[in-house]
Structure formats: C-alpha cells, structure tokens
Amino acid sequence: VVPHVGKAEENQWRGWIYCQDVLFPKIQEVASAAWSTYSKPVPSSCNELLALFLQCCCITALIGGLFYNWLFASLEYPSHLSAATAAFFSFLLLVALFLVHPFRCMFTIIVPTIGTKQGRKLLLSTCFMIVAVNITPNIMENIKTILQVIKCICKNSSESLLNSTALLGKASWEFGHHIKPVFDNLLVWKPMNGPFQLLVDRNTSIKEDFSAAELLVKGAVLISNRVVAGFFMFFLFFESAWYVKSYLTNLQFDNIYITKKLECLAVEKETTNLLACLPKNLIKSTGLKLSREETMVCLMRMMLLTLVLLLTVVIIATDHIAFYLADTAMKEVVKLPTVPVTLNIKYNAKVNIVPFLSSLFLYGGPTAVDFQRSYHQNLTFVSADCTRKLASPPNNSVALVVGLLFCIIYAMIFLETYAHRLCRKISASFFESQEEQRVYYLYSKLLKTYKKKEQEAFSERKAVL
C-alpha cells in the first residue's frame, strides 16, 4: 500500500508542477494576447483582426442573451418583442465594438460601473420588483381570503335569518287561520301575509374591488420598473461615456493613484525620495486599504441601505402576519356551531260579547280559542363554500433571494472604490499614450510640491540660523 500511496502523491505533485509551470503561464499568455488585441486601437495583423471579431461576437452573443432574458423574464415584455429588440441591440453592439475603439473602452468600463452606484440601483430595483410581484400580491390574496370568510359568514347569517322570518310567517299564518272561524261572525278578518323585508349588506363587490386594486398595483409596479430600467441603461452608458471623455480631456480627473509607471519615472529621474513623502490623498493602485474619507462614505451608504432593508423586512413580516390571520380565520370558522332556534306559540283565549251586542252580531255564546304549536329552525353561519379557499402561505425562497441581493448590495458598497480603480486601469490599457501624459502631469505636480516644501524647510532653517 505504501508504494502505491507514494506513487499517487508523486503524480499529484507532477500535475501541480505542470499546471504551475506550463498550464497557468499558457493561460495567462493567451489572456494577455486577447486583451492586447481587444484594447488596441487598430489590429496589427489579420490574425488580430479575426481574434477581435471573434471576441466581439462572443461578447455580443452573451449580452444579447442576457438582454433578452431581462426584457422577457424581468420586465415582462412579449417574447417576440423581446427577441426582436435583443437581436437589433446585439447587431448594433457588434458593429460598434468591432469598429469603434473608444466605444470598446466605454463598454468595458460598464462592467465595473455596475459594481458602483448604478449597480446598486439595479439590484435595489430588482428587490422592489421581486417584493411587488411576489410578496405584495400574496398579502392581498390573504386579505381577500379573510374578507371572503367575513362575506360568507354575513351571507349565510342573512339567509338563515331570512329563513327564520319565513318560519315566523308560517306560524303567523297558521295562528290566524286557526282563530279566523271565531271572528267570522264578528268582523272582517284578513291576516296580513306581506313579505318580511330585511336589509342585507351587499358585500359581493369586495373581492372584485381588491382584485382590481391588485391588478392596478401590478401594472403600476411593472410600468415603474420599465421606466427605471430605461433610465438605468441610459445612465449606465452615460456614466461610462462621461468617464472616458473626462479621462481623455482632463489630466486631473481621477489622477490620484501611485502606479508602476510613476515609480519607474521617479527612478528614471533619480527622485526616489519623492515617493517617500507623498500626499495622503494619493492611493496605491494595487493596494486594498481604504482611506478614512472612503470609509466614512461607505458607512453613510450602509445606513441609508439599512433603512431600505427595514422597509423590506416590514413588508415580508406583513406577509407572514396576513397569512397567520387568514389561516387562523379559516380554522376558526370551521368551528362555528349551528344554532338551533325553537319557536313555541301557546295561545289560550275566551271570547264573550256583551249581552246587548249579542243580538247585533248574532252571537250565539262564549267561544274558547286554544292554539299551541312548536316550530324548529337551525341558524347556520358558515357553509362548505366558506372553507373551500385556503390561505396562501408566504414564499420563503423569495425572502431568501431578497436577503442575498441585499448582502450583495452591502458588499458592493465597499467594492465601489475598487471598481473606480479598475475603471482607471481599463482606460489606461486602452489609451496608453494618454496614461503616460497623466503620469507625467502627476509627477510634475508632485515634484513642484516637493520642491516647494524643501524651499520652505530651507527658509525655516535659514531663519533659525
């Protein structure tokens, strides 16, 4: 067993050495060559031209697929309209990427720009859309369930009361029919057989009203998301174009980084002591440390994001509360018992007329009336239709997705600084001559500041002497 284990470890070691000495350098070489071809203003050979075209085709196909999925799945546009829009956008993107060098730079800067403020806006818009499309309708569905139970109870109670009034009318008719022969010789007797009128609450439109409100909310949220998506795409391209334009026209713009070219220039000019006393606002381009100002900005953005998170948590909690109330109402309504109602009528009377009126009414003598009946009725408050619709439980996976999106947004707050640094590196690789001018400008500015400080220090020492 021991020789076998030693041979396996030897094979693993050989595989690691091969990856470290051959595979990884080869991948790095291919990636560097592809990036060099992509960032060049003009390809220097046919092979580079073909490689550039293939890269643009791959990028266009990927962006076109994502754009179609975003239009169809997220913004809920029709399938044919989404496909046509994505195809037209992909064609324009391919032409622009292949022919326009500054556009390639601007489009590449969009990737780290998504990790900045615009990316956070996109993710927040996605969170709001998920909450509005999945959680808010579920809350309204449970509210409709509760109102449906209330309406059903009111309807069945009204019908039961109406049936009880019919029972009362039957008892009144039988009682009148029983005592009618007694008074036939005295007066004209006509029992009142009019219908009993009850005021029944018309709540049948509650469900329809809430359905209309739900559709209105969904439509408003969908339209607002489409408008926000349009503005997001516009500002995303605008911010990238503005960065490239400022980088090319303003030497002071975003020129606060200590790069290798600056260090090499200081060594070449024999002013390495200049790098020892750099201003605090300069940032090492390859460093990960955040400055104090950047940290305070991140904390302020986190506080604002926390307020939005609390609002989202309240909506998710409302969803659970509405489900609990609807589920409890459905369970309790089943327990409502049937109320038996018994109507007992006992009537005993003796009719006697004054003697001097007997001849007038032709009355033969005293008459006794005896009436005793019992009527039974059951009052039902619920029916089988009341419990047919169950409460809609909250979707915990939606809450999990929203939570993950907020975690990504929190991480993007700290990554925004590094996204800005990456934008500068991309621009520097696309416009090398402009980057050299920016390095010379920063070097001359630091040199002037350094000489000014030396002159002030020399003046102070001379004044002391």
Image: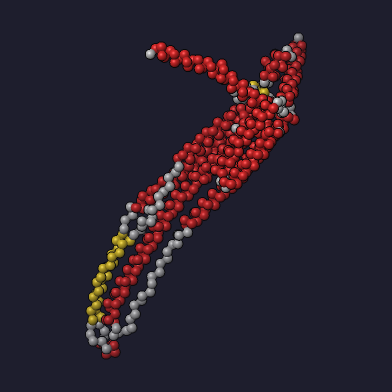
Image spot of residue 354 (x, y percent): 26, 85
Picture quadrant of residue 349? bottom left
Colouring rule applied to residues: secondary structure
State the residue in front, 75 or 272.
Answer: 75
At x 42%, y 64%, the residue is: 200
Image spot of residue 400 (x, y percent): 47, 37
From the viewer's perspective, is residue 394 above or below residue 463? below
Q: Is residue 271 visible?
A: no
At x 62%, y 44%, the residue is: 85
Is the C terminus in the top left, top right, bottom left or bottom right quadrant? top right
Residue 271 lies left or right of residue 355; in this view the side is right
Image spot of residue 228 (x, y percent): 61, 43
From the viewer's perspective, is residue 102 above or below residue 169? above
At x 47%, y 15%, the residue is: 11
Residue 339 lies left or right of residue 274; in this view the side is left
Q: Is residue 213 visible?
A: yes
State the residue in front, 287 or 226.
Answer: 226
Most distant residue in the front direction: 46
Is the N terminus in the top left, top right, bottom left or bottom right quadrant? top left
Q: Count the marks.
A: 0
From the viewer's perspective, is residue 336 above or below residue 451? below
From the viewer's perspective, is residue 205 above or below residue 86? below
Picture quadrant of residue 446? top right
Residue 227 lies left or right of residue 444; in this view the side is left
State the residue in front, 349 or 208.
Answer: 208
Image spot of residue 118 (x, y percent): 62, 36
Picture quadrant of residue 420? top right
At x 65%, y 39%, the residue is: 91
State the residue in front, 8 or 398.
Answer: 8
Most distant residue in the top direction: 465
